[in-house]
Amino acid sequence: MEDLSLHILDIVENSITAGASNIRIKINEDTKENLLLIEISDNGRGMDEEMLKNALDPFHTTRTTRNVGLGIPFLADAARDTGGDISIKSAKGEGTTISAAFRHDHIDRKPLGDIGKTLIVIIASNPDIDIIFEHKKNTSEYMLDTAEIKKELDGVPINAPGVIKVIENDLKEWFNNTNLMIK
């Protein structure tokens, strides 16, 4: 995967497949500490001990459509290539949290990519799932909570084109103001 937004999309798709109705995506960029932390947590089915033990093995998957599961191992490799690491916490019936830490300035760190477009794809294609996106860059913070947005929509679907455009513009403004948008 060329950028970290695609890793995020892959992990979120895993969460959706695991039956999650709430997914939290956190990105913390702390340039003073030279840290980029990506954390994705969900309230899906979670993993038992055996599945958790095999989560980093690319030749182990619960999918029936293919014999490999590369998403989590590729994210782990991307983090480790920068001197970082990955951790997975999960409990059957309680959900999963995947955290990947990267050295922010490492030459091998993949770019964040277009996180805004990734979020739009997730929200537009999964209107029944609540997504919380939090991004902190040094002292600046941004949060998007689709459950809160849905409360304000008075029955209008969150994936209606006009609503998606408003969310997309809000994300663009945030990323443009933090110099993160890749054009």
Image: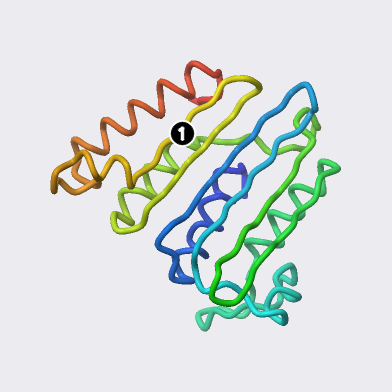
Task: Please state if 119 lies on the left or on the right of 33 as rendered.
Answer: left
Q: Residue placed at 18% from the left, 35% from the top?
A: 162
Residue 56 position within the rendered picture, expressed as x and y whole percent measured from the top left: 74, 67
Q: Please, what secondary structure does the residue beneath circle 1 have?
A: strand
Q: Identify which residue is drawn at 64% across, 34% down.
A: 28
| 79, 183: nearer the viewer | 79
Above or below residue 140? Residue 5 is: below
Residue located at (65% from left, 65% from top): 70
- Type of the residue with mark 1: Met
In this rendering, the answer to whether 112 lies above or below 126 is: above
Front in this rendered view, residue 25 or 60: 25
- The location of residue 153, given as percent across then percent down, is 18, 41
Residue 22 coordinates in the image, percent (x, y) = 43, 57
Q: Residues within 10 Å of mark 1 (few under 14, many from 20)?
A: some
Please identify the residue farthest to the top as the structure is shown: 177
Disc 1 target residue: 143
